[in-house]
Image: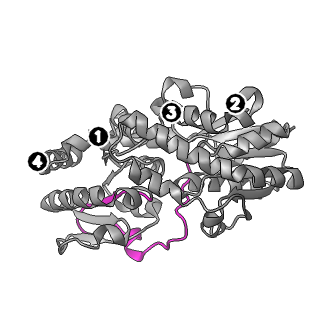
Amino acid sequence: MRILFTTQPLSGHFFPLVPLAWACRLAGHEVLVATAENFVSVATRAGLPVTACGPPADFLAEAFAATRHYSLADRRYAHGQAFARASEQALPELGKLVDSWRPDVVVCERAETAGPLVAAAGGIPFAELHWGVAELREYRIAATQVLGAAGPGNALPVPDWVINPWPPTLRLPYAASHQSIRSIDYNGDTPVPDWALRGEGPPRVCVTFGTVLPEAYLDDVSGVVRTLLENLARLGLTVVVAVDEKVVADWPRLPTSVSHVGRMPLSEVMRTCVAAVHHGGQGTTLTALAANLPQLVLPVFDDQFDNAEAVERSGAGMILHPQELTAAVIGDRCHRLLSTGRYADAATRVAHEMSVQPAPSEIAAGLARLAA
């Protein structure tokens, strides 16, 4: 069987596809990943066959930066437009690829909408790999306005199967019928440092802000992280800061208990931590939950707010909203997060729920049934 995976050219969108794509390969299926030209080099490092469909989509980060001061709904709509334009640019080449390679199933991540259109045009079943807790209606409205005319009945096609890595108790009602899949981390090609395998010394906290946030919101992130680090250092903690070099370029000297480690394989780093502080991106949030970590979540855009609210509802952490980013509030939240075991207990319950969800190998078998 041939399975075509389609993704927007962003690590946070592609990485969740990797374990399922590999599960399909290990089951004996042919797999091909299609993405924008400028992302091919990143995608190939996952060891999967990758082909370019569409010109470089470099405007995505610019679109995120340009909407910093929009309302949440307007920002989501604008981001949905940016993703739809990237899909529109990929559509001609993706259609040719489907005609020539003839996949039996198409699997797309939820922001990539060219894949569903070419699948529907070719009568091919398609599955959507969901990310985030939010329904993101604004994305679909924007995508329909940009691409709807290319779909059946001037609308985007509905997936035959929606696959969701979030544990059912953290989902919103609209996602109740989604097919669960166990969240398996793919962290890219960064090596695991020796210190990350040991839990020696004072309790360790991981601070990270993902891939898009430091690129599009650099000024905001730099100031917030400095305030966080000052407060965490006062609590006698070892702090590892897993953010890009550009975020820390103009920082003053860090306290001795704080180490900037750059991009790290978070699934390994978090196993020796007692808590995580992050932005609420899907990959980081699920990685921290799977590691039984209580979390302090500072959402900035799109699905991050719903992800953060899900963590808070579960009891596994707390939200810090943008208007609360003062030294006093941050210090209080950090102290509360680490001074009681109830957040860690809740995180452990969620981690267990995640661990019993179907493995990617089981979902690969489901894709074969979908194509039958």
Task: Of the two numbered discs 2 and 3 on the same chain, state the one appearing first in sequence.
Answer: 3
- The quarter of the picture where residue 72 lies is top left
Q: Judge whether residue 176 can be spotted in this image.
A: yes
Foreground label between 4 and 2: 2
Front one among 18 and 289 = 18
Task: Of the two numbered discs 1 and 3 on the same chain, state the one appearing first in sequence.
Answer: 3
Q: Position of residue 269 (x, y in %)?
A: 40, 64
In the image: residue 18, left or right of residue 59 = right
Tag 1 secondary structure: strand
Alpha-carbon span between mark 1 and mark 2: 33 Å
Q: Which residues are magenta?
A: 182-211
Front one among 194 and 170 = 170
Alpha-carbon span between mark 4 and mark 1: 15 Å
Question: Do the residues under discs 1 and 3 have CB atoms within 8 angstroms?
Answer: no
Q: Position of residue 126 (x, y in %)?
A: 75, 39
Foreground label between 3 and 4: 3
Q: What residue does disc 1 label?
A: 319
Q: Position of residue 66 (x, y in %)?
A: 40, 51
Kind of residue at disc 2: Val
- What's the residue at 65%, 48% (across, down)? 87
Kind of residue at disc 1: Ile
Front one among 226 and 269 = 226
Residue sitting at the far top = 173
Question: Do the residues under discs 1 and 2 have CB atoms within 8 angstroms?
Answer: no
